[in-house]
Amino acid sequence: MAGSAAEVEKYASWNGGMSPLRASYGKLFMWFFLVSDALTFSGFLCAYGFFRHNFAGEWPDPQAVFHHFPFLHGVHLPLMYVGLMTFILIMSSVTMVLAVEAGHRNYRKGVLIWMFATIIGGLMFVGSQAWEWTNFIKGSEHGAVLYNHNMYLYKVDHATHEPILDILTFHNKELSAAESKEILAKGEPFHGANLQYNEYGQPAFADFFFFITGFHGFHVFSGVVINICIFIMALNGYMKRVGHYEMVEKVGLYWHFVDLVWVFVFTFFYLL
Amino acid sequence: MSEFHDVYPDYEGMAQHDEAAGKKIRKKLWMVFWLLLVVTIFEVIVGFFAAKWGVSKTVLKFLFIGLTLVKAGYIVMVFMHLGHESKWTKYMILVPYAFFIIYLFLMMTMGEGNYVNEHRHTGHPSNGQVDMQTPAAAPADAEHH
């Protein structure tokens, strides 16, 4: 049947011999997996947003909670260490994409160097996250007061960020001096945050912190493990044998996804 | 692996480029890195000084979310090379996700979260008023039967 050039081309492309969307199936399926994982993390973050709006008055201020820096004890540096962690992860993302680019030029030495840098960056990030968890669980020096399964927080002077040690607050409502004295006498000091009690404020904050950063940290850790596998494969010359470095690109997609999730977690948890 | 490819074009091989093109690509990658770094530093600084400069919380929210979307866009389009894929690949990945996230965020987080926050002290039994030691501040809402 006679037809125009476009119709003939359409007939040919429907006739097979061409991958849909003109990409290899391995890459497409990695994208499918990343979309599903992105929806998972979006569900977590939206649940976090729901709880945050629910308890809007008594949600801890991240700048008051995350103000420590390694080797600088007692110095108040809000969100500096988290900013450093973000920088490390973005840097590892850049080294990853440089490894992918070296793979596109079939340049094995470049792939090995940049993959190694990515692995180091990933390990630094996981280590930093572990340090953050330790500090979060250990808590601040002044802590809070636990009495009758209820958490009473010290009122914080907003100018100096120091706690006023004779006035307590309960669910963001200040107690009178007499009530505070009574509870300070009967209650016991409590430091840090765990899945039951949170000295910084609403317990849901601690629950979400552990859950979301734990999930993300697990993704980073598994990404590091996979990167090490791909590094060893490149070292042994597997990619040189098959003639292309697409494995590096697929693993690169996963690593960039991990960085992408961190960008959103950083914004919603620490900034907003 | 060849049994899966049959007579398909060599997509893995087609992605390759030479050293000269590689230099230009690497330059673009480093530019995106500096952009991400500068935006992140800007966000941290604004977050730190927001109270002192009197920036309203709404402006802050939209600024942070907007900048995060910009960062995400550059990571997805440049680092993950989605910008180099065919048009329908891009749509296939971004459009369903966009539908879900817009619904989830507006309906669940904003809608439900604000509703529950607003109606917490209305004295309706489902609010668990007995567990909280603060008394109900407002009389029962007329909408609750």
Image: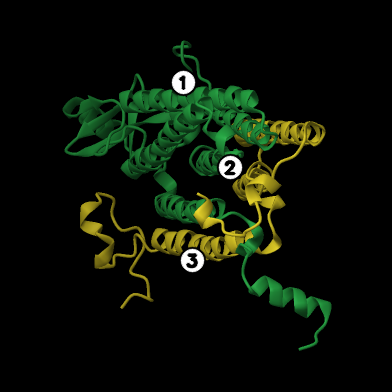
What is the quadrant of the C terminus of chain A in the image?
top right
What is the x, y in percent for residue A124?
Answer: 48, 22
Give the drawing colour for chain B: yellow
The amino acid type, in three-letter code, at marker 3 is Met
Image position of B111 with respect to A15: above or below:
above
* SS at circle 3: helix
Residue B68, visible in the rendered structure: yes
Q: Are marks 2 and 3 on the same chain?
A: no
Q: Nearer the viewer, residue B84 or A127?
A: B84
Residue A157, visible in the rendered structure: no
Say left or right for A140 vs B58.
Answer: left
Q: Which residue is at 80% across, 85% downward? A: A3
The amino acid type, in three-letter code, at marker 2 is Glu
Read off the residue under disc 3: B107
Read off the residue under disc 2: A246
Q: Are marks 1 and 3 on the same chain?
A: no
Q: Nearer the observer, disc 2 or disc 3?
A: 2
What's the mark number on residue A68?
1
What is the x, y in percent for residue A196?
Answer: 24, 39
The amino acid type, in three-letter code, at marker 1 is His
Q: Nearer the viewer, residue A45 or A88?
A: A88
- Crowding near the residue tagged with mark 1, few <14, some 14–19, many ≥20 C-alpha atoms within 10 Å: many
Q: Which residue is at 28% across, 67% downward? A: B124
